[in-house]
Image (cartoon, rainbow, N blue to C red):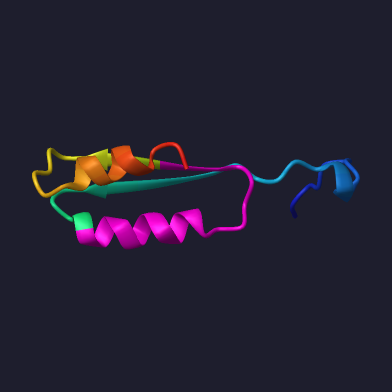
Amino acid sequence: MAVKPNIPPKTRRPASISVITVTYNACDLLRATMESVLAQDTADLEHIIIDGGSADGTVALVEGRSFE
């Protein structure tokens, strides 16, 4: 049986969500992944991208979107 915190629903903080994407030379696929994560309707969301040394523009894509 789960125990619910004794906090009124309106004052509960939304769950923190971390999306971790690991990529290597997948710039085209990563673009769609980033768009999907950005489209989420969650205020407390972070997207962590780990690149394995791509040479296909992946790093430039991530750097160009890093402050959105």
| Place of residue 60 in the rendered image (x, y in percent of width and height, measured from the top left) | 22, 41
The reply to whether the magenta stretch includes residue 21 is no
Which residue is situated farthest in the left direction here?
Answer: 55
Query: In what quadrant of the picture does the N terminus appear?
Result: bottom right
Which residue is situated farthest in the front direction here?
Answer: 64
Identify which residue, 9 or 27, lies in the foreground: 27
The reply to whether the magenta stretch includes residue 29 is yes
Judge left or right: residue 30 versus residue 43: left
Judge left or right: residue 57 versus residue 67: left
Quadrant hosting residue 54: top left
Judge left or right: residue 13 versus residue 60: right
Quadrant hosting residue 55: top left
Across the whole image, how many numbered discs are drawn on residues? 0
Q: Residue at x 20, y 47 (%)?
A: 58
Residue numbers of the magenta segment: 28-47
Q: Residue at x 37, y 43 (%)?
A: 65
| Place of residue 31 in the rendered image (x, y in percent of width and height, measured from the top left) | 30, 57
Q: Residue at x 22, y 61 (%)?
A: 28
Judge left or right: residue 15 versus residue 33: right
Q: Residue at x 64, y 46 (%)?
A: 43
